[in-house]
Image: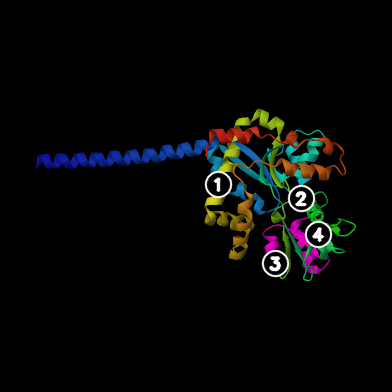
Amino acid sequence: MPGKGKCHMSELAQFRLAKLFLWASIFVSMFIGVASVAFAQTVRIAVGTVSIASLPTWVAKDSGYFTREGIQPELIYIRGGPQTISALVGGDVNFAQVYSGPILSSHLTGADTLIVAGLVNQPLFSVVTAPGIDKPEDLRGKKVGISTYGSATDLVLRLALKKWGLKADSEVSILQMRGVPEIFPALVSGSIQAGVLSPPTNMTAVKAGFKELSYLPQLGISFQHTCLATTRRYVDKNRAATLKLLKAYVAAIDRIKTDKPYAKKVLSKYMQTTDPEVLEYSYNAANPVFKSPPYPTLDGIRATLDFLAEKEPKARQAQPKEFVDLSLLEEVEKTNPR
């Protein structure tokens, strides 16, 4: 019996010790988690209106990829490319997710803006038309809505019209509607006969009876759409943080491509829709345009420079490589072999 009691006490002691170890482990894990957040570097990222082009940023945030890299992300929604670049140059934000036009324009006027990644290197838009406009030449004499002059919708429409042999302004009227969300109501009201829409608004328009005349990624246009931009002074002082941020983006894009249900869940949250048809279409439209690693396209930057050269002569002599820093993504690739 004494031996039996001794065994019982030993097992009890072991149980108590295991329990103590468990609580200690939980405490240490909680402390490490709190400490990692406390010591994480806050990075402010400006994003535009809700669009599937923001999916890598949303996934990197919601999946914890930023946090894993020691980055505490702060997403700031700013509407309009020029306003976004002003915030970037002024130091109000550290990175900006924005169309290439405003980045190049600011650089040409002396700002130290810099493209470090190309999140979307194709024109992620559709030209959607009213019934009766069934082919590009039917746009002749019609009014087409864009967001604003000088915007991505403006440039991509002009590139598409050129591809179709139509003259912008003289043969096809281009009207600014202020934003992509405002283009659809103008189409419904009949004040314009066509519009440049991005997912999921283009899908909404098609479901309402309008026609997708052309899904522009299939048109073969070189176009640097959504960039991740910062400033040279920020990279010089925060190169390590920039590399960590880019690692998080690469992980997010890989997740998008391999985990469709999760990507659709994130789209549903940020686009505030549970429509399965819209989510399926949006994912299928977005998935092919995200590249890993997300290098920008120099041909696309050249197209933007040519567009800007109509008003800014310096753009004609500028070289695309002046506006990008590819060494960061190259370093990410070396340290994270695929």
Q: How far, Cα to Cα, is label 3 from label 2?
A: 21 Å
Q: For mark 4, give the secondary structure.
A: strand
The earlier-in-sequence mark between 3 and 2 is 2
Circle 1 sits on which residue? 254
Circle 4 sits on which residue? 145
Give how far across and how far down residue 93 sits, in percent: 69, 39
Q: Extreme right residue here?
A: 170
Vertical arrangement, residue 275 with respect to residue 222, above or below: below
Q: For mark 1, give the secondary structure.
A: helix
The magenta span reads: 179-206
Circle 3 sits on which residue? 206
Q: How far, Cα to Cα, is label 1 from label 3?
A: 30 Å
Q: How crowded is mark 1: few (under 14 residues within 10 Å), some or many (20 or more)?
A: some
Q: Can residue 242 be seen in this view?
A: no
Residue under the point 59% across and 61% down: 280
Q: For mark 2, give the secondary structure.
A: helix
Mark carried by residue 152: 2
